[in-house]
Image (spheres, helix red, strand yellow):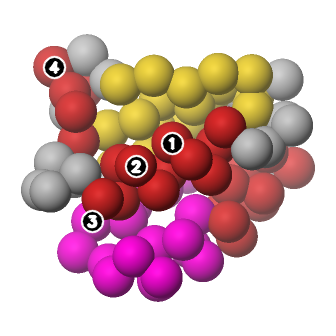
Amino acid sequence: MKKDVIYLRRLRWDEAELKLMKELDILYLKGIKKIKIVHGKGGGKLKEMVAAYLSRQPFVEGFEQAPYYEGGSGVTIVTFR
C-alpha cells in the first residue's frame, strides 16, 4: 500500500468513517500535500460520506473526483492547506 492513499473499499460505512478520520489526520500531520482516498464506485454511500467529512475539515483545501485513468468516480483526490 502506498503511503499517500487511504483504502476504504469493502469496509462498512462506520468502519470506513473511523479509518478515514484516523488516517487523514496522520497524513496531514506528516506534511503530505495531496492524497487519494479509494472508496470504490458501488452505490456511492462511501463517496458521499467521504465528501461530507472532507467538507467539514479546516485543513482540507479541496477535493475532487480522480480522472478516469486514476480511478474515476471510485477515487477522491484531496489537497491539504
Tell me if label 1 and label 4 are in contact, CB under 8 Å: no
The reply to whether discs 3 and 2 touch (Cβ–Cβ < 8 Å) is: no
Q: Which residue is mark 4?
A: 68
- Percent x, y of residue 44: 23, 51
* Residue placed under numbered mark 1 in the picture: 51
- Which tag, 4 or 2, sits closer to the chain's start? 2
Q: Which mark is residue 9?
A: 3
Residue stretch rendered in magenta on the structure: 3-20
- Residue 30 x/y as whole percent: 82, 47
Q: Is residue 22 above or below residue 59?
A: below
Query: What amino acid type is highlighted by mark number 3?
Result: Arg
**Could you give the CA–CA distance between mark 3 and mark 2, rounded to whole angstroms?**
13 Å
For marks 4 and 2, give the one nearer the viewer.
2
Gap in Å between the C-alphas at discs 1 and 4? Answer: 18 Å
Question: N-terminal of the two: label 1 or label 4?
Answer: 1
- The answer to which quarter of the image holds residue 80 is top right
Check disc 3 and report its element: helix, strand or loop: loop
Q: Amino acid at mark 4?
A: Tyr
| Residue at the (41%, 35%) spot, across then down | 76
Name which residue type carries label 1. Ala
Label 1 SS: helix
**Lateral position of residue 55 relative to residue 58, left or right:** left
Inspect the magenta stretch and tell me whether residue 9 lies in it.
Answer: yes
Query: What kind of element bears circle 4?
Result: helix
- Vertically, is 47 above or below 8? above
Neighbor class of circle 1 (other Cα within 10 Å; few <14, some 14-19, many 20+) is some
